[in-house]
Amino acid sequence: MAALLVFLLAAAPAPAQAPEAGPWGGAEHLARAGRTTEALHRFRRIVDEHPGDVEARLWLARLLRWTGEREAAEREYRRSLERAPDHVDALTGLAALLNVRGAFDEASTLLDRAEALTPASADVFATRAQGLRLAGRPSRAEGYYLRARALSPDDADIRQGLEQVRRLTRHRVEASVLHESVSGLAAGAQAADVRLDVRAADHLRFNGRIQADTRASRHDVRAGGGLEWRARPALTIRGSTLLGPGADVMARSETVVELDHVRGRLEPAVAARYMAFATAGVWIVSPAAAWWLDDRTAVTVRYYGSRTAFAGRDAVIDHSGAVRVRHNLRPRLWLDAGYARGFESFERLSAERLGLFRADTVSGGVLFHLAGLQSLSAAIEYQRRDDERTMIRITAGVVHRF
């Protein structure tokens, strides 16, 4: 985090004064050296003593922004603009914060003013691209990132933003394989999953999918497809169906509908799923919420409520829950860890686990975005079931965009 902060602050325009001149003391030097707490303390004191010092207030706003104190940063940017309405750094910094909280119209108005003042600014173009991406218009965002990169080709943030929108705008093929071994069983299980995702428009994608599963001398295959529709910038709806009429282990049919909503740092979601096995039907409702602790770390909590109806038997009601932590360790590197009680994933529900299923599962994984349009992932899960059996599952995946 310190290294990232140093880079971001180093890219900020320097004031006309030398760092040690006037009331500034060594505050700017502390900020550029990544000594955030000390720099915040110094700039707060400077602003209290010299409320008209716009550059000091802007430094305070930048530090608050990069440390995740968005509301406080927004207040300081607005106070800076009250004293200097045409300050491009203040206009751009406030617009970036407004983009994050979804106030796209106000952010665009500020950027129009900034662009009129500096028609060829990499920061202005990159901030406009950020807003377009968050508003669900990645194709237009890519154009602005390209203009920003032409003006500032060595800016790491601009390069990463361009990579991010390209990951959103391209078609993609996703493939994964897994191996699962359970204590007490001689043969393990293997599965493969291949999905083609085609972008029809910024707000609409279609996909086709095929899955294969081998366990206990049984070989199942099923296929299907679905769509993803971004109904509003903050609301995404997904639906899909998979069919495998002769499947014995996997569900012979599976239908899923999911809704995701973004509310600032909170991302609530809900999914409804129906799975028809050869011997039973399973209804699942799964509300969830992801909370971003800062710009790099998110915690997701999910509940699964299921109802399994067997022919000629009473239905079985079951409850499961899971928590997952994701962290962006490096610009292209994500790590995650999780814990689940009960079913760890209904996407991998198989016939031998129908009904009440009690287990504790811990997991860890890594996702790495290559410099091009490919991504690699790997994960391992360890499960201890209440019947004393243990399970280890290893998964590897690749995504290719084109």
Image (tube, rainbow, N blue to C red):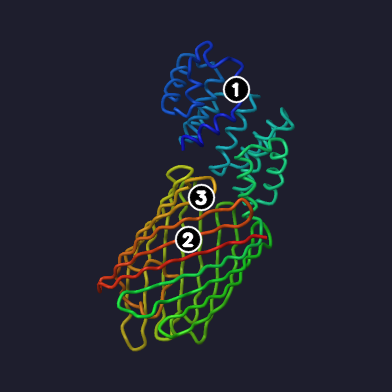
Of the residues under marks 3 and 2, which one precedes in the sequence? 3
Farthest-out residue, front: 186
Question: In which quadrant of the rendered view does residue 10 lie?
Answer: top right
Spatial CA distance of label 3 from label 2 is: 12 Å
Other-residue count near label 1 (Cα within 10 Å), few / some / many at <14 / 14–19 / ≥20: few
- The secondary element bearing badge 3 is classed as strand
Give the mark toward the camera: 1 or 3. 3
Spatial CA distance of label 1 from label 2 is: 43 Å
Total marks shown come to: 3
Asked whether, in this view, residue 141 is left or right of residue 323, the answer is right
The amino acid type found where label 3 is placed reads Leu
**Mark 3 lies on residue:** 333
- In this rendering, is residue 127 above or below 33? below
Label disc, if present, on residue 14 of the rendered structure: 1
Other-residue count near label 3 (Cα within 10 Å), few / some / many at <14 / 14–19 / ≥20: some
Spatial CA distance of label 1 from label 3 is: 31 Å
- The secondary element bearing badge 2 is classed as strand
Asked whether, in this view, residue 386 is left or right of residue 152, the answer is left
Q: Residue shown at 40%/52% (left/top)?
A: 325
Of the residues under marks 1 and 3, which one precedes in the sequence? 1
The amino acid type found where label 2 is placed reads Ala
**Mark 2 lies on residue:** 378
